[in-house]
Image: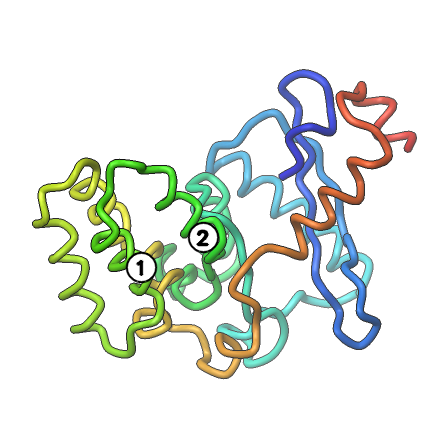
Amino acid sequence: MAFKRIHGITNEWEVTAYLPRVQKTLTFARIFTNIETAEAYQNLLEDLFGCIERDIGKTFNFHHIHGEGLGCIIADQHKGQALGLGQYLLNSKYPHLTLIEHLQHIYKLCQVHYKRNIDKNKALSSEIRSAMYIVSNLNTQNEVLKILHKIRDCGEPGTTAWVKDKLTPWVLSGISSVFSKMDHIIWSQTPNNTNAGESAHANVNRDGCNLSLLARIVR
């Protein structure tokens, strides 16, 4: 989401990917929105994938459903975006899985955002901060739960709420591969950050910020 691009409450939502074979980050779609609810993102995704399917003349494939196609979406922990994706897959396409199960198969959370949010709490001890950092690197569910319980029970400011948030099923599976239902090869071969998207924001902002919506569309 590019927040600086357009004047006022409208933001620019970009769909990007890094293509190793051409060594470039490509932006596939730009969508303008001033609403960030799950319902708004569900509608946004219905329009986005509807356009894609009309262009390619066939159903857009998701790996966890079709065995091929898009296998991973990497994002920050924006609740509206995540639940909107889950609602799109559940209500518009594939009701045989729950909303949460869809996210557990395809949604991966950016580790840069994850660690940046930890660093915002300046009251944390170095021990607890380090414990938070390693959650995503642990190899078993028991190890993850043990460290989360340690953080929750430490009594430091904000830790109880932090652990409660991270135990949300779609959040936990987005952070930790041992809770994810994503194909393990796809998990290991996809980035653990949204740097491609962030670089796209930086590149497009060079063309101007705080623009009117019309000026942005023209550019």
Q: Position of residue 32 (x, y in %)?
A: 70, 32
SS label for mark 2: helix
SS label for mark 1: helix
Q: Amino acid at mark 2?
A: Gly
Residue at x 71%, y 50% (from the top left corner): 199
Q: Which residue is mark 2?
A: 86
Q: Is residue 29 left or right of residue 96?
A: right
Residue at x 21%, y 52% (from the top left corner): 128
Q: Is residue 169 above or below residue 205?
A: below
Q: Earlier in the sequence, mark 2 or mark 1?
A: 2
Applied colour scheme: rainbow
Q: Position of residue 114 (x, y in %)?
A: 41, 51
Q: Which mark is residue 84?
A: none
Task: Residue 57: name its quadrant.
Answer: bottom right
Disc number lying in front (2 or 1): 1
Between the residue at mark 2 and the residue at mark 1, the CA separation in whole angstroms equals: 15 Å
Task: Residue 98: name its quadrant.
Answer: bottom left
Q: Nearer the viewer, residue 60 or 9?
A: 9
Q: Is residue 61 left or right of residue 112?
A: right
Q: Which residue is mark 1?
A: 172
Q: Amino acid at mark 1?
A: Leu
Q: Is residue 130 left or right of residue 107?
A: left
View extreme (front): residue: 126
